[in-house]
Amino acid sequence: MTAGTGNDVVAKVAAALRNNGDRMTASRRAVVEVLLHEPGHMSAEQVAAAAAHVHRSSVYRALETLTGLGFVQHVHLGHGSTAYHLISHTGPHLHAQCRSCGTVYDLPGPLLDAVARRLDQELGFHLEAHHVALSGTCADCTTRAA
Amino acid sequence: MTAGTGNDVVAKVAAALRNNGDRMTASRRAVVEVLLHEPGHMSAEQVAAAAAHVHRSSVYRALETLTGLGFVQHVHLGHGSTAYHLISHTGPHLHAQCRSCGTVYDLPGPLLDAVARRLDQELGFHLEAHHVALSGTCADCTTRAA
DNA sequence: ATGAGTGCAAAGTGTTTGCAACTAT
DNA sequence: ATAGTTGCAAACACTTTGCACTCAT
């Protein structure tokens, strides 16, 4: 796997934190471990639920800190919710969410590369395609609706 | 223009409403007129502010009704906010929002057509590209940051 | 007349913040 | 020792909802 063992990641996070004048705490370790043991994307609420003794606000703060250090990435989904995941855990990829059932699908990372180039050339807009989930209707829901 | 005069649109909305067993009310007319007289995308709050005597909740309800009738479209932006506009007002287009300054840029409607085809073929996912704003950093903010 | 629509106030999400107590360094 | 972190509660932004009243039809 690309992520190494859980202990590896925890150790790397600890090192990065201290390197930055920050501290490795039980809350931050718990958040990392939750993200590590979950396959996909999680909402802050899911993380808080899985890290039972860590307060919601500390979960948000830990996720923010870990994002700043480059370990965590978040995606904005529809309806104002946000999903988080370890960057090392799954590799670079984009997201699409079904408008009907809410399922989040992973898409190949380079899917929007051509579009990104075009936006860059024509508008000087630097696309961060992973940062929002594309929206649409998934195959299951299309079938179900028919 | 593609939209005809404001009166045209108001009349079409009234007809569509009655056709549907719904009613044309002062609130709904006010919301349509606000959207008609504004160039770009508006948040529900901006609509409420511009339609001074219409209550916020009625603005939301009117926007929902008008969406159902196919006159209004909304885009999800970052941070859980939503922008609305008349479909007839500007023609089909996509949106990109600068992560740094929040500005929303209009993009050519067909920009993601190739991607949409690919998603459809490979996953059966039917992309609705206009429904969320792409995210990134605009030229101004890139310059400013450098 | 009568049911759809409105204003209001209250509840509901998801997220952030001020502050005193706590703890990793 | 001492600054970074936490838990808590309260505030936030945005949106939805229950209800009695009003108004378009």
Image (cartoon, coloured by chain):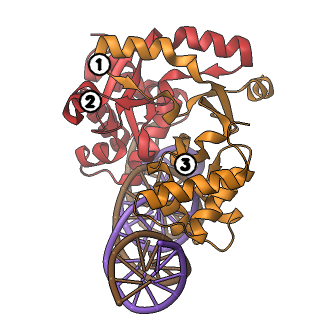
Chain colours: A red, B orange, C brown, D purple
Which chain does tag 3 point to? Answer: B
Residue at screen point 26% across, 52% down: A53
Instruction: Identify the mark nearer the N-term, 1 or 3.
Output: 3
Residue at 55% of width from left, 59% of height from top? B14
Q: Which residue is mark 1?
A: B124
Return the chain for callout 2: A
Nearest to the eye among marks 3 and 2: give it.
Answer: 2
Which chain letter matches label 1? B
Q: How crowded is the residue under tag 2: few (<14 C-alpha within 10 Å), some, or many (20+)?
A: some
Image marks 1 and 3: residues in contact by CB distance under 8 Å: no
Q: What kind of residue is marked 1?
A: Gly
* Circle 3: residue type: Ser
Q: Is residue B80 left or right of residue B136?
A: left
Residue named by callout 3: B81
Q: Which residue is mark 2?
A: A142
Q: Position of residue B89 (x, y in %)?
A: 66, 41
> Which x, y percent locates residue A129?
52, 22
Q: Residue at x 56, y 68 (%)?
A: B56
Side of B93 relative to D10 (left or right): right
Q: Name the element at disc 1.
A: loop
Nearer to the camera, A130 or B76 = B76
Q: Mark 1 and mark 3: span between their CA atoms?
A: 28 Å
Between residue C21 and residue B6, name the one nearer to us.
B6
Res D12 quadrant in image: bottom right
Measure the alpha-carbon separation of dots 3 and 2. 27 Å
Give amino acid for label 2: Thr
